[in-house]
Image (tube, grey):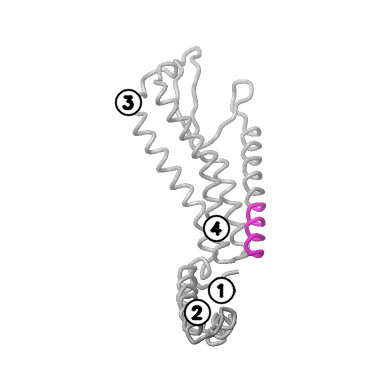
Amino acid sequence: MPPFETVRERLLRAGIAPRHAQRYVTELREHLADLIERERASGLNETKAVERARSFVGNDAELAQAMIDRAPARSLVARAPWAVFALSPVPLWMALIGVTDSSMIHVLSPLNSIAPSAMPESYRALIGILGFLINYLAGVLLTAGYLVLALRQRLSTPWLWVGLVLLALFSSMLGFHWHEYQAEAGHPGGWGFSVLAFFYLHGHRDLAVTLGVAALHAAVLFVAAIVAYRVWRLRLVRT
């Protein structure tokens, strides 16, 4: 284990922002390297030089407490986990959907009058790629981002799971969904998109199927988040 890694862990658990903790540990390592070099120059072998230099610096508990006593700014994640994890996911997701939908309305507006069969393949490809990114990948990436925020600060807070439940639910129900309408008697057909994912049964929207698929999607995302959190946290403990 690199020197002063325990110091960094103590600082993170105390709510010190990761950048401040890393800067302090870097300074300690540089100072220790200078002391070791000085002791080696005085005639000590490598082992003795390291032991003597380490005794001058102090033990990890004292070094960590000295930094904590300086009362540097605690990270926002540590000060207000309820705001970071529970309040931000839904507005962030809604903003993402809003930007995506408004952008696509602008991009597809010249094609409003054409039939679905006449839509250029390049536009179909764009719709397909964007649908995959928003409906399947964006929620995963945002979930991973929140997990990283919590693990970087060594937090284990129920607010994280409240936020991830909300993110899983909203990302499963709201997204970018393309629809084609077949021509019927009195209706020429057409195309459009919505923020809600509708599923059809026997040609009609089925609310039970729609909610069931959304619930399954949300459950898979949330369970994957739990597994990823436990695996990453275990790796942090082992290192």
How far is the residue under mark 2 from the one under mark 4? Answer: 30 Å
Give the SS element for disc 4. helix
Q: Are marks 1 and 2 in contact (CB under 8 Å)?
A: yes
Residue 32 located within the stretch drawn in magenta: no
Distance from label 1 to label 4 (Cα)?
24 Å
The image shows residue 41 at horizontal and vertical percentages of: 47, 83
If the image is split into quadrants, where does the C terminus sit? Answer: bottom right
Indicate the amino acid at tag 1.
Pro
Give the mark toward the camera: 4 or 3: 4
Q: Earlier in the sequence, mark 1 or mark 4?
A: 1
Q: Which residues are magenta?
A: 226-239
Residue occupying the point 52% across, 48% down = 141
Report the Cα–Cα distance between label 2 and label 3: 66 Å
The three-letter amino acid code for the residue at tag 3 is: Pro
Give the residue type that dot 4 points to: Val
* Residue where numbered disc 1 is placed: 3
Instruction: Determine which residue is flagged by label 2.
Output: 32
- Check if mark 2's residue and mark 3's residue have beta carbons within 8 Å: no
Looking at the rendered structure, the number of numbered marks drawn on it comes to: 4
Q: Nearer the viewer, mark 1 or mark 3?
A: 1
Count residues near mark 2 (Cα–Cα under 10 Å), then give few for <14, some for 14-19, many for 20+. Answer: many
Name which quarter of the figure residue 103 lies in: top left
- Report how far apart the C-alphas of labels 4 and 3 lie in the structure: 41 Å
Amino acid, disc 2: Leu
Measure the alpha-carbon separation of dots 1 and 3: 62 Å
Contact between labelled residues 4 and 1, with CB atoms less than 8 Å apart: no
In the picture of the structure, the residue carrying the numbered disc 4 is 148
Contact? badges 2 and 4 (CB < 8 Å) = no
Upstream in the sequence, badge 2 or badge 3? Answer: 2
